[in-house]
Image (cartoon, grey):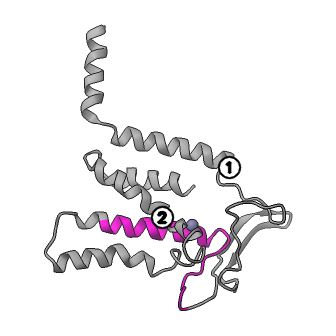
Amino acid sequence: MHLALTLFFIAACLKAEDRKFALALIPLGIICDLDSYIGVHRATFHNLFVIFIPLIVMFILWRLHVNAIKDKYFILASLLLAFHIFLDTFYNGVFLFYPFSDKSYDIEFWLGLKETGLSALFQWTVPGKVGEINYVVTPTPSVPEIAIISGIEFVVLIFASITFFLKFQDTYSSSFLYQKLRIRK
Ligand SMILES: [Zn+2]
């Protein structure tokens, strides 16, 4: 789901000429999950401080008077990191203030119809200790398996990929193809 939303987000925010940067920004939408391997999952790269890293790099480059990369790409990079972290906050929780706090923040939101009528649920914090949420990398019989991608997510990812491809496809080659098709007619 993270990858699909990243593709949609980049395709919506950037112009077709920005293809190189669009491709370079894709990893920013999924890079947080590297903490499954390095550090503590949902903590090391899933905290509020991580969001500011691209902006800090931007300020450093300002000080060095390097302006090879436009500011908007750093801002988009920060937004992609924030997007990932907040999605996870709504899905099993994140250690938002790690390493300063060991509390997990799990936002539960539910709005729907029950027998009694319209019902809403909004819950903010579920305290937990760092490392308490166990994400399965190699599923073992004692822990439930967690799907990497489900049916709905797969469909969303396909549509996101098509959207991304159509927006950033090589305009030269597509017009070349279009010309060829016209000649054949
Ligand atoms: Zn994540």
**Which picture quadrant has residue 140?**
bottom right
Residue 144 drawn above or below residue 98: above
Residue type at mark 2?
A: Ile
Residue 133, given in percent of the width and then of the height, sits at 70, 75
Residue position for label 2: 31
Residue 90 located within the stretch drawn in magenta: yes
Residue 113, given in percent of the width and then of the height, sits at 77, 62
Which residue range is magenta in the image? Answer: 74-100
Ligand 1 quarter of the rendering:
bottom right
Task: Judge left or right: residue 3 versus residue 184.
Answer: right
Decide if residue 15 is in sight here: no
Q: How far apart, in angstroms, are the residues tagged by discs 2 and 1?
A: 20 Å
Residue type at mark 1?
A: Ser
Q: Secondary structure at mark 1?
A: loop
- Quadrant assignment for the N terminus: bottom right
Residue 169 drawn above or below residue 114: above
73 or 141, which is in the foreground? Answer: 141
Task: Judge left or right: residue 33 versus residue 137.
Answer: left
Q: Are the residues flagged by discs 2 and 1 in contact, CB closer than 8 Å? A: no
Residue at image location 70% in from the left, 55% down from the top: 147
Task: Judge left or right: residue 5 versus residue 54.
Answer: right
Residue 15, given in percent of the width and then of the height, sits at 29, 49
Say if disc 2 is inside 8 Å of ligand 1: no
> Which comes before the other along the chain, label 2 or label 1?
2
Residue at image location 18% in from the left, 63% down from the top: 68
Say if disc 1 is inside 8 Å of ligand 1: no
Task: Judge left or right: residue 154 versus residue 5.
Answer: right
Residue 127 located within the stretch drawn in magenta: no
Q: Secondary structure at mark 2?
A: helix
**Which picture quadrant has residue 129?**
bottom right
Q: Determine the residue located farthest toward the left in the rendered image.
A: 65
Residue position for label 1: 150
